[in-house]
Image (spheres, rainbow, N blue to C red):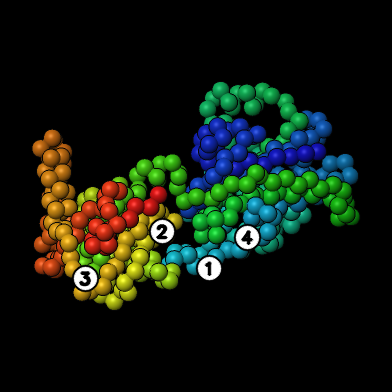
């Protein structure tokens, strides 16, 4: 007897096309329903049917009278996963078990990363019940079309298939960028409770990510940071997906020279850019700006380097130049048939009340070292 385990999401089984032999290199987390698809290879179709009857109804066969089945989420190296209590103000790490026809909200929270079942202990609170398993292969999401159902129903197989539906908000980034795997262990016992056989398998290592990495890189990014770098000055961020309607909970995280971070709120209700202001008590030096969705720290841009200068440093250029360019782009879009809703809040300097002395400019790759020192502005980081 041997078995294999794969993780699947959605009708097509996530990125593996529903194929039992394939496994994606990343899985969506953030409490997205996932199927653990277990395939047990038996010696004959009769043994497969007997094993299914034992696991589903507790029906003994031969000298096998009971069985246990344990699913456990581990780190790639086999170490137990530590569920984090706090993640930047979000909820603690959780693993939820879901009925085959249920949804995440209806799921039950497990005490740790282990989901254990024993045919002889179905009524115990330490073991889940067989109703949480899907034994009908035609009801798997990836077999939902009529053609697939007919093929599964007509085929006599020596493979017993079992599905387990669960969800988690554990992410690779929050766990020091470690990868994960799911391990499953099937143990068969005789009438006296002695172990007769044991089979173990696990998924290939994968990352738990809050979203599709290819899509998020296009939809949400920080391209440039414009600021004169003095205390109280404006910081204007340009990129993609930064508008208040797209991400109303967006904030800026400013990481300082010694690793300390400061959270800066959005000023105004901009439709395409993010504007904030430097605090008055920042020490001069190099800083790194990252835009983060406050209610979900996993949704964040890459960092862009900027600099805070001394208060007495002489300013060199006008921030108005950048705001005028943004306003011109908005007018151009409206003239070409774009949205005619109200103008961007960040387009007008009056909406964020900059100081009269504020001077700033864009950062360019061709900027000389002397100009960079004068402006104290963005340095591109890739």
Q: Nearer the viewer, residue 115 or 217?
A: 217
- Quadrant position of the N terminus in the picture: top right
Disc 2 secondary structure class: strand
Dot 1 or dot 3, earlier in sequence: 1
Q: Which residue is mark 2?
A: 296
Q: Of the residues tagged 1 and 3, which is closer to the observer? A: 3
Disc 1 secondary structure class: loop
Query: Residue lying furthest bottom in this view?
Result: 281
Q: 10 Å neighbourhood of mark 2: few (<14), some, or many (≥20)?
A: some
Quadrant of residue 113 within the rendered picture: bottom right
Distance Cα–Cα, label 3 vs label 4: 50 Å
For the image shown, how many numbered marks are present on the structure? 4
Q: Is residue 66 above or below residue 234?
A: above
Give residue 95's position: percent from left, percent from top: 57, 57
Residue at left 74%, top 49%? 185
Dot 2 or dot 4, earlier in sequence: 4
Q: Which residue is mark 1?
A: 85
Q: Which residue is mark 3?
A: 313
Quadrant of residue 275 within the rendered picture: bottom left
Q: 10 Å neighbourhood of mark 1: few (<14), some, or many (≥20)?
A: few
Dot 3 or dot 2, earlier in sequence: 2
Q: Nearer the viewer, residue 149 or 284?
A: 284
**From where the camera sits, is residue 142 visible?**
no
Checking the image for residue 377, the label placed there is none
Q: Is residue 149 above or below residue 218?
A: above
């Amino acid at each position: 007897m041997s078995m294999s385990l794969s993780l699947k999401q959605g009708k097509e089984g996530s990125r593996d096309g529903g194929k039992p032999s394939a496994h994606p290199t990343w899985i969506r987390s953030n409490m997205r329903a996932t199927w653990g698809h277990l395939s047990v290879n038996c010696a004959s179709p009769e043994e497969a049917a007997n094993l299914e009857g034992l696991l589903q109804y507790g029906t003994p066969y031969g000298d096998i009278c009971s069985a246990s089945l344990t699913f456990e989420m581990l780190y790639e190296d086999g170490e137990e996963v530590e569920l984090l209590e706090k993640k930047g103000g979000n909820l603690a790490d959780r693993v939820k078990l879901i009925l085959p026809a249920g949804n995440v909200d209806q799921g039950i929270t497990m005490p740790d990363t282990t989901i254990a079942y024993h045919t002889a202990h179905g009524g115990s609170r330490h073991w889940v019940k067989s109703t949480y398993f899907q034994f009908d292969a035609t009801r798997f999401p990836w077999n939902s079309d009529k053609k697939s159902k007919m093929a599964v129903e007509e085929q006599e197989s020596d493979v017993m298939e079992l599905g387990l539906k669960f969800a988690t908000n554990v992410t690779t980034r929050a766990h020091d960028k470690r990868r994960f795997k799911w391990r499953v262990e099937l143990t068969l016992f005789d009438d006296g409770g002695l172990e007769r056989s044991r089979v173990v398998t696990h998924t290939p290592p994968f990352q738990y990510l809050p979203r599709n990495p290819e899509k998020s890189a296009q939809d949400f990014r920080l391209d440039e940071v414009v600021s004169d770098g003095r205390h109280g000055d404006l910081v204007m961020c340009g990129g993609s997906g930064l508008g208040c309607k797209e991400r109303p909970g967006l904030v800026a995280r400013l990481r300082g020279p010694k690793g300390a971070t400061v959270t800066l709120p959005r000023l105004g209700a901009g439709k395409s850019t993010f504007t904030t202001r430097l605090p008055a008590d920042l020490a001069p030096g190099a800083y790194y700006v990252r835009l983060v969705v406050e209610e979900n720290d996993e949704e964040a841009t890459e960092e862009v380097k900027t600099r805070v200068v001394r208060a007495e440093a002489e300013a060199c250029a006008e921030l108005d130049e950048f705001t005028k360019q943004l306003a011109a782009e908005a007018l151009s879009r409206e003239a070409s048939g774009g949205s005619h809703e109200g103008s961007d809040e960040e387009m007008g300097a009056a909406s964020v009340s900059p100081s009269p002395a504020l001077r700033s400019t864009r950062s360019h790759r061709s900027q000389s070292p002397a100009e960079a020192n004068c402006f104290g502005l963005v340095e591109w980081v890739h």
